[in-house]
Image (cartoon, helix red, strand yellow):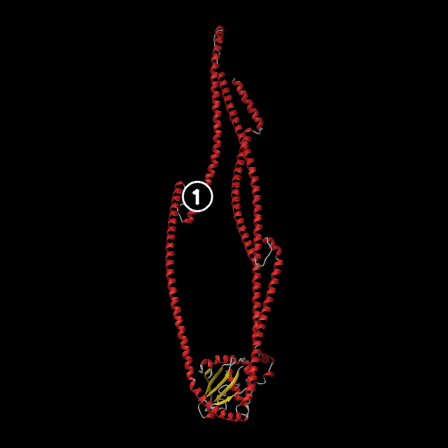
């Protein structure tokens, strides 16, 4: 338990600055009695100033220090020295020094001089020597209330309350609440509430983050569903295009077969028509020969005998003519066979010509495509002179330039790779050297920091010793005064003790005080443990509530998304493995999506090729139809509005008639 031992005052209010006034406090009660203005309130003010560092109200400008005019001096130095027993039983000494100076303008200037908080004499832990703890006012203002075991608010408003401030219980509610909060240290409960609010805010933020993450996952799932629907639509489109392609190919095959049949039919018709024209020409020639023969023939003169003789010889002449005619007929048949074989060759050549024309068109298309690709490659690689009119020599030159450029690029790449490998090796070597240098610098820095710490600690120790030595003269003077006063009091007390039985009473009081102090210590320890337990219970209760809320939220979320999770993942939701399962399924879905996208791109390429082939086939079909229309138109013009069958029958009959006449 903390207690006050002795107070020394010099140069404060009515206390003279030439001598020190010492007040000793006794246990359990010390009563201070005196006339008005004798300094009773000043003692309380000095106690408050020594423990808290706060001066009494309305004492700004030096009113708290002895008046220099009454001392007939220009400067007055004041000192308040308090010796007390801390809550842990250690005897401490607090010294605060002040000074006030008279200004030239009749005003006063107050200064706060050095202050000391040290261990008092007779301290067994320090070997009877005084050790300085702090010389800073701010540190003393915070350290002394901790040593006394009470807060600064209790010292100001309860223990050392000034008489002018003693009416604070009747103050306004707001000020009164602030006073009670400071006295009962309600701020720690406020801090606890603030920490609870902060925790709640963090949990709300985490919940929002989880909600955002859930919304993000939902958006990704919706995007995945859209992609799946798109893939399904593309698959359906591909299937429809394949069916359409099969139908088109089937119709194209049928059209090709019909065109082949029509071409064969037209070729046969063309042969017949050509033969009919040949027969008509031969008939016209024979008729013209007959007319010429009629014109040129004359009657043979002669007698009947001569004519009969000639008639008899005519059989032989006719036989010779017939033999000549048969030879000419054989020649004509041979010529017909040669003509038919030549026409067959002509048809084959016509077919070959059509095939070669198709191949020529395809070759022209490939050459145009090659020229376009050469132009694109030339623009990309900046190869000039190959924009148009590309013949074989230019193509060969371009390919040689392209190969040369490729060779140069490969050589440049190899050079860059060698340079990169050399740079990497150089970088590795330099990095190793720098790391070694860095390690050495770190070792040097750590050694220098160690030396610096040692020097700083020695400097601080030396400064404390110097400060302790500076306060020795004033302490020695106060100790001499204390010794003189104590000697007088000791002689007086010895006389009083001789007449009264104080030893016995003192032993009894000491025994009772020790028992009470032990009980107080036990109660304090119990009180501290209960406070700790209450804080721990409050934190535990809060954490349990958080755990229950989180567990409820998790269960609610799982129950809400149970069917969806089971449908998507294929297993029952488990809070511990749910994230891993979702990541696994998400990875699988992404892999499936990438595979489907690759397959869709492949199908699109195939579909594009099929469409290109279909368009080329349509163009060829259109050309065949145009050719067919031209042939039909030509046939109609040649037949002069007659049917094909009738023309064929007529031509066949005419051919047979011509053959019969030749025979």
Q: Which of 365 and 570 is in front in this view?
A: 570
Q: Quadrant of the N terminus?
A: bottom right
> What residue appears at the point 54 percent right and 18 percent down from the top-left corner?
660
Name which quarter of the figure residue 173 lies in. bottom right
| Relative height, residue 5 to residue 290 (above, below) | below
Q: How many marks?
A: 1
| Relative height, residue 621 to residue 267 (above, below) | below
Pick out the residue farthest to the top.
Answer: 305
**Residue 572 is at least partly visible in this image:** yes
Q: In the image, 196: left or right of 319?
A: right
Q: Return the x and y of residue 488 as percentages of the image width and height.
A: 48, 93
Q: Mark 1 highlights which residue? A: 371
Q: Which of 502 and 57 is in front in this view?
A: 502
**Residue 76 is at least partly visible in this image:** no
Q: Return the x and y of residue 515 as percentages of the image width and height.
A: 57, 82
Q: Return the x and y of residue 353 as percentages of the image width and height.
A: 47, 33
Is disc 1 surrounded by few (<14), some (14 to 19) or many (20+) residues within 10 Å? some
> What residue appears at the point 58 percent right and 85 percent down from the top-left corner?
166
Q: In the image, 383: left or right of 220?
A: left
Identify the secondary structure beneath mark 1.
Answer: helix
Name which quarter of the figure residue 468 lies in. bottom left
Q: Return the x and y of residue 573 as percentages of the image width and height.
A: 60, 56
| Relative height, residue 407 to residue 339 (above, below) | below
Q: Which of 64 and 235 is in front in this view?
A: 64
């Amino acid at each position: 338990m903390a207690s006050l031992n002795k107070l020394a005052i010099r140069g404060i209010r009515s206390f003279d600055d030439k001598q020190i006034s010492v007040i000793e406090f006794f246990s359990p009660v010390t009563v201070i009695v005196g006339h008005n203005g004798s300094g009773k309130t000043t003692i309380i003010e000095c106690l408050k100033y020594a423990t808290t560092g706060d001066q009494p109200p309305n004492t700004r400008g030096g009113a708290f220090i002895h008046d220099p005019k009454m001392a007939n001096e220009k400067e007055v130095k004041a000192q308040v020295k308090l010796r007390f027993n801390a809550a842990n039983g250690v005897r401490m000494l607090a010294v605060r020094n002040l000074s006030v100076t008279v200004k030239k303008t009749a005003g006063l200037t107050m200064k706060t001089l050095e202050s000391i908080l040290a261990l008092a004499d007779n301290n067994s832990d320090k070997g009877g020597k005084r050790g300085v703890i702090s010389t800073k006012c701010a540190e003393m203002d915070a350290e002394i209330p901790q040593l006394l075991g009470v807060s600064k608010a209790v010292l100001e408003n309860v223990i050392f309350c000034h008489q002018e401030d003693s009416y604070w219980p009747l103050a306004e509610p707001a000020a009164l609440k602030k006073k009670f909060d400071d006295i009962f240290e309600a701020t720690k409960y406020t801090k606890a509430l603030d920490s609870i609010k902060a925790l709640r805010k963090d949990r709300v933020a985490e919940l929002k983050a989880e909600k955002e993450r859930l919304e993000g996952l939902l958006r990704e799932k919706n995007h995945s569903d859209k992609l799946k629907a798109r893939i399904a639509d593309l698959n359906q489109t591909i299937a429809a295009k394949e069916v359409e392609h099969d139908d088109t190919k089937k119709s194209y095959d049928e059209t090709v077969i019909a065109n082949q049949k029509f071409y064969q039919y037209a070729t046969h018709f063309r042969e017949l028509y050509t033969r009919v024209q040949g027969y008509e020409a031969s008939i016209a020639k024979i008729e013209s020969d007959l007319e010429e023969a009629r014109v040129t023939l004359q009657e043979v003169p002669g007698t009947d005998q001569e004519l009969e003789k000639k008639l008899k010889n005519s059989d032989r002449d006719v036989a010779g003519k017939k033999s000549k005619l048969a030879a000419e007929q054989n020649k004509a048949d041979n010529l017909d066979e040669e003509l038919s074989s030549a026409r067959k060759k002509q048809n084959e050549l016509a077919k070959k010509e059509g095939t070669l024309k198709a191949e020529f068109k395809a070759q022209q298309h490939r050459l145009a495509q090659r020229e376009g690709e050469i132009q694109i490659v030339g623009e990309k690689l900046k190869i000039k002179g190959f924009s148009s009119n590309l013949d074989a020599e230019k193509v060969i030159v371009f390919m040689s330039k392209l190969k040369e450029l490729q060779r140069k690029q490969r050589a440049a790449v190899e050079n860059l790779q060698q340079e990169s490998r050399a740079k990497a090796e150089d970088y590795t070597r330099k990095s190793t050297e720098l790391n070694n240098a860095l390690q050495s610098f770190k070792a040097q820095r750590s050694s220098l920091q160690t030396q610096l710490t040692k020097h700083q600690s020695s400097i601080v120790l030396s400064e404390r010793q110097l400060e302790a030595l500076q306060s020795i003269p004033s302490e020695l003077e106060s100790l001499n005064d204390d010794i003189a006063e104590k000697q007088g009091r000791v002689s007086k007390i010895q006389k009083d003790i001789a007449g009264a039985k104080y030893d016995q009473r003192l032993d009894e009081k000491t025994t009772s005080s020790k028992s009470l102090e032990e009980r107080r210590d036990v109660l304090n320890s119990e009180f501290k443990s209960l406070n700790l337990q209450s804080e721990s219970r409050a934190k535990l209760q809060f954490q349990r509530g958080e755990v229950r809320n989180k567990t409820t939220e998790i269960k609610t979320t799982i129950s809400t998304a149970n069917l969806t999770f089971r449908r998507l993942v294929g297993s029952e939701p488990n809070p511990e493995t749910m994230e891993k399962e979702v990541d696994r399924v998400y990875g699988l879905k992404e892999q499936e999506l990438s595979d489907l996208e690759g397959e869709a791109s492949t199908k699109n390429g195939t579909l594009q090729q099929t469409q290109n082939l279909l368009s080329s086939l349509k163009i060829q079909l259109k050309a065949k139809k145009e050719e067919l229309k031209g042939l039909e138109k030509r046939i109609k013009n040649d037949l002069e509005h007659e049917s094909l069958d009738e023309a064929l029958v007529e031509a066949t009959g005419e051919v047979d008639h011509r053959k019969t006449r030749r025979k």
